[in-house]
Amino acid sequence: MSNRRALHFVFKIADRKKTIEFLREVLGMKVLRHEEFEQGCEAACNGPYDLKWSKTMIGYGPEDSHFVLELTYNYGVKNYKSGETLKSIEIQNNNMKKLQDYLSKTDKKIVDNYSTNAEESPIKYPLDVSKGSENQISKVVLRTQDYEKSVRFWNELLEMKLIDKTNSSALLSYGEGQTQLEILNCKPGWERGEDYGRIAFSCPSDQLDVIEKKVGESTLGSVMKSKVTLPTPGKADVQVVILQDPSGHEICFVGEEGFADLSQVDPNANELLNKSMLEDKSVEWFQNKEKKSQK
């Protein structure tokens, strides 16, 4: 059994209100913590933007036992050019009625499964929601442009267990019951776009240097950001290493000791997020700008 664990997938969202409404009210996720930052993240957690931004962790349970979503919101960024790196996020949901009621307003109907592409998704990312006995984010599915190298990268360098492999896809995991990673064998040429995400894993802090050295000395992937300590105002600091696989997918490894402190559920998270959204006038600013340009 590995001592590494899948933690979360990072989305860059442009419409924070609509995204939160869908995940919280329709899919039944809970806001676990919310944090505001005055400048861009040193490890590009919010992408290549040196702006005021926020981070919202949302999911079906505490981060120490559930795979969740990290929503990064850059103030002043209206939209992101869609890419094709993410095939889908697979979600098991035990209350499909909320989703059915939501979709009925758009004349769409579901039975046990709801799949979207990025253009159709309320959060602008592809989702695959299926009826399940319990709520959970069960799988992250990524496209790859160099399939065999990617399988070796995740299996040999990052030491994920290879559960199954065919000519078209490979399924990997760090342990039973954890959210799985599936990589698809796709033809070269798809666009990375601006909305590319990042998948995060925890490991003992003394493994960070080992992981960085192993990837840095390989020809399979690359080190995007060497080990760095990231502060969060009023909360614990964490050490991270940021990597890229052969297709450019970003991977964050975070030291589990600091993360265990940082990731505690904040009972005020929902209130903090609501306050931030209420005070955010970005949408009105963009609307006024568009009206002026049309005159």
Image (cartoon, rainbow, N blue to C red):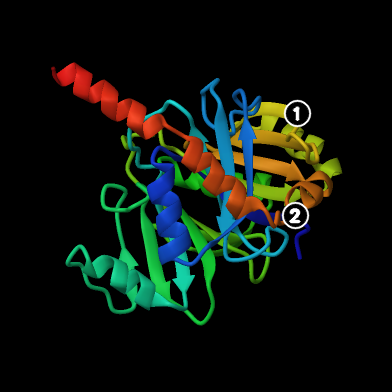
Which of the 4 image quarters holds residue 198? Answer: top right
Q: Residue furthest bottom?
A: 133
Q: Residue 286's spot in the image, x, y percent?
A: 32, 27
Dividing the image into 4 quarters, which one contains the C terminus?
top left
Q: In the rendered structure, find residue 62 and report the number of the disc placed on it.
A: none
* Residue under the image location 20 percent in, 24 percent down: 291
Q: Which residue is mark 2?
A: 264
Nearest the viewer among 95 and 244 is: 95
* Crowd band around label 2 with a 10 angstrom C-alpha radius: few (<14), some (14–19), many (20+): some
Question: On screen, 290 above or below 166?
Answer: above
Q: Residue 147's spot in the image, x, y percent?
A: 45, 46
Q: Residue 87's spot in the image, x, y percent?
A: 38, 52
Amino acid type assigned to the residue bearing label 1 in the image? Val
* Crowd band around label 1 with a 10 angstrom C-alpha radius: few (<14), some (14–19), many (20+): some
* Residue under the image location 17 percent in, 67 percent down: 107
Q: Which of the two discs, 2 and 1, sits closer to the camera?
A: 2
Camera sees residue 167: no
Dividing the image into 4 quarters, which one contains the N terminus?
bottom right
Question: On screen, 174 above or below 155?
Answer: below
Q: How many marks?
A: 2
Nearest the viewer among 59 and 268 is: 268
Q: Residue 97's spot in the image, x, y percent?
A: 36, 77
Nearest the viewer among 160 and 20 is: 20
- Work out whether mark 2 precedes mark 1 in sequence or the reverse, and give the earlier one: 1
Amino acid type assigned to the residue bearing label 2 in the image? Gln
Q: Which residue is mark 1?
A: 228
Q: Say what secondary structure mark 2 lies in.
A: loop
Question: On screen, 22 above or below 244?
Answer: below
Question: On screen, 65 above or below 40?
Answer: below
Tell me how far mark 2 sits from mark 1, CA to CA. 21 Å
